[in-house]
Amino acid sequence: MTRAKWIAGVVFALAVGVGAGWNYSQAAEKFTSDDYVAILQGYAEYVQGVDGIAGDCKGEHYANAFTNDGMMQAGPERLKNPLGGREAIIKMGTKKAPCTSSSRHIVTNPVVHSNGDGTARVSAYIMLFNQAANPPTLISHRATNDLWVKTPGGWKMKHRINSTIPSNTPFDKDAKWVNGAWVCANGCGY
């Protein structure tokens, strides 16, 4: 092999390696700090909606955290009977006037992992307090495992599993909405 061919081969290999590294870094940069903050903001809006602080009484604020085909599995009744679709989530979030409640949900320790495809998996704790008590008392401590998707309207929850600690429910990332029901390889965690 001549020296010119050897140098050409090294230059080619470096170009391919740098190009591959550049493509990898571009893919890794798809999930930005703005995306991270938008998901955290989504949680803040969600808990204000579920606690009735938004004041709409109709569950719209609560449902806005979800995609139109989003699924909610929270509490023993919903782990086995998932709630799916915007209208069902609005109904669940609808409150009688006055809209506020004495409960306050607090999302803590969120861990956000980008899936690299416009989705992110988030695990966090949710603590539910009765703020009317003096001092406020812890009502429930839960773990949540959520799938968020980036939509034209911002980041929205597609699938939420929320279970009381210590009986955390595994999340099936391959769950699919088929003919009005969720189909999961592992039985949707139950």
Image (cartoon, helix red, strand yellow):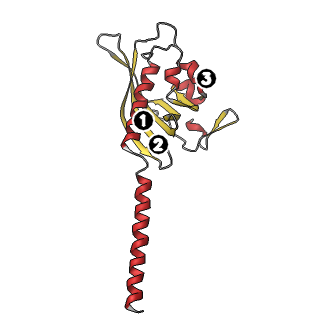
Q: Residue at point 41% right, 70% down?
A: 17
Badge 3 element:
helix
Q: Residue at point 34% right, 10% down?
A: 133
Badge 2 element:
strand
Residue type indicated by callout 1: Ile
User: Can you tell which mark lies on residue 39?
Assistant: 1
Upstream in sequence: badge 3 or badge 2:
3
Above-or-below relation of 14 to 83: below
Q: Residue at point 39% right, 86% down?
A: 6
Q: Is disc 2 in contact with disc 1, using a CB cutoff of under 8 Å?
A: yes
Find residue 148 and report its horizontal and vertical position in percent.
49, 38
Upstream in sequence: badge 1 or badge 3:
1
Q: Dot 3 surroundings within 10 Å: few (below 14), some, or many (20 or more)?
A: some
Q: Dot 1 surroundings within 10 Å: few (below 14), some, or many (20 or more)?
A: many
Q: Which residue is mark 2?
A: 120
Along the viewing direction, whichever of 135 and 116 lies nearer the viewer: 116
Upstream in sequence: badge 2 or badge 1:
1
Residue type indicated by callout 2: Ala
Q: CA distance from mark 2 to mark 1?
A: 9 Å
Q: Residue at point 40% right, 31% down?
A: 41
Find residue 169 and report its horizontal and vertical position in percent.
50, 36
Residue type indicated by callout 3: Glu
Q: Dot 2 surroundings within 10 Å: few (below 14), some, or many (20 or more)?
A: many
Count of numbered labels shown in the rendering:
3
Q: Which residue is mark 3?
A: 87
